[in-house]
Every structure is written in structure tokens, then in C-alpha cells.
Amino acid sequence: MTCPLQCLILLTSGGKRTSHTPNDIMTALTSLSAADSIALEFYEENANYVAGFGLTNLEREERRLFNYGKKVAARIVDAAVAMSKTRTPYTDEQVEFIAQTYVACGGDRQTIVAAFLNRFPLSGHSADSVDQKVCRFQVLDASRPDMVQWETDNQVRRIAKDFPEFFAAA
């Protein structure tokens, strides 16, 4: 596709900021048929043109394709919104456990994930989700100054302050 996923989010949400992420959009995109993909790509390529000049400058088949692509884009965003509503937030107890385990085992991600899933088996968090939370702590780890690709959230920064000798960047 020629338009980035953030563009798709903005096109279909009227330019407003939304709570769904590119991962939600990518998950929704995996179920597209070939016709849906073609229509979506046409919509993305021509959205600015249509916004400026209207649909009347397009041929009838192109107008139909554009409108179908617009519906596909809206369907994708609706699916992403539905997915984002099913997320389970981490409790402070869970994040504190991740931080304590991180400090205890020196940041070994696999060990931390296994310990978390053993301690909180019904938490609703996948191994990948826990691993991503661990990566947020790695960004703050004083012994890993090269870890900068993850953004941290307020909850992680707040809990990391309880371990100033380990998480100096908090």
C-alpha cells in the first residue's frame, strides 16, 4: 500500500486522534481479499485528490472503486477499535512483579515472561505482551544505554523509580 497505516487511521477518523494502534490495523488488514486490497489502495491513493476536487472528476468505475475502498477502510478501523477495546491493562501488582523479576534475573526476558505467566496465568496477557512490557523496562535499564527503540509508559516509569540503582533513566 502506498499510504502508511497512520494515514489510514487519520483518513477514516476524520483527522482525529484515535486510540487504536498500527498493530490493530495490521491485524485487521490480514483478512482482506484481493478486491478489498485493490479498492483500499485506490482509496488511499486518491483520497487527497477527491478531497480537493470531488468525485465528479473520476470515471464511474473509479468512483465506485473509491467508495468501496472508503467502506473497506472504515471496516478496518472499526475492527481495530473493537480489538483495542478488548485489551487488558496491567495492574500495578503485575508491573511491580515484572520489575522485581527483571532486577532479580538481570533482565533475561524469557525468564521474566515465564515467571510472569507462571505467577499470573489468568491475567489475559500473552507472552508477547509481557515481553513488550519487559522491553519497556530495558529502555530504562542503566546497564543498557543502547536500548532506545521502545517508548515507556507512566506506569513503568513510576514503578521503575522504586529501583533507582537499576533503572537510572526513570
Image (spheres, helix red, strand yellow):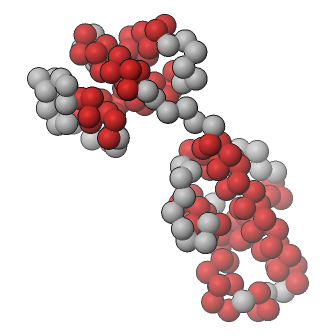
| For residue 89, side relative to residue 69 (left or right) | left
| For residue 120, side relative to residue 107 (left or right) | right
Is the C terminus in the top left, top right, bottom left or bottom right quadrant? top left
- Residue 90, x across and y down, in percent: 45, 29
- Residue 11, x across and y down, in percent: 61, 69
Write the residue at 49% across / 7% down: 118
Q: Quadrant of residue 27?
A: top right
Query: In the picture shown, does residue 103 fall above or below 36?
Result: above
Residue furthest front in the image: 92
Q: Could you tell me if residue 4 is visible in this image?
A: no
- Residue 141, x across and y down, in percent: 21, 29
Write the residue at 17% across / 36% down: 169
Is the N terminus in the top left, top right, bottom left or bottom right quadrant? bottom right
Write the residue at 60% across / 44% down: 84
Query: In the picture shown, does residue 33 fall above or below 41?
Result: above
Q: Could you tell me if residue 86 is visible in this image?
A: yes
Q: Quadrant of residue 14?
A: bottom right
Write the residue at 77% across / 87% down: 55
Q: Quadrant of residue 88?
A: top right
Query: In the picture shown, does residue 49 fall above or below 77?
Result: below
- Residue 22, x across and y down, in percent: 55, 50
**How many labels were placed on the picture?**
0
Q: Nearer the viewer, residue 115 or 65?
A: 115
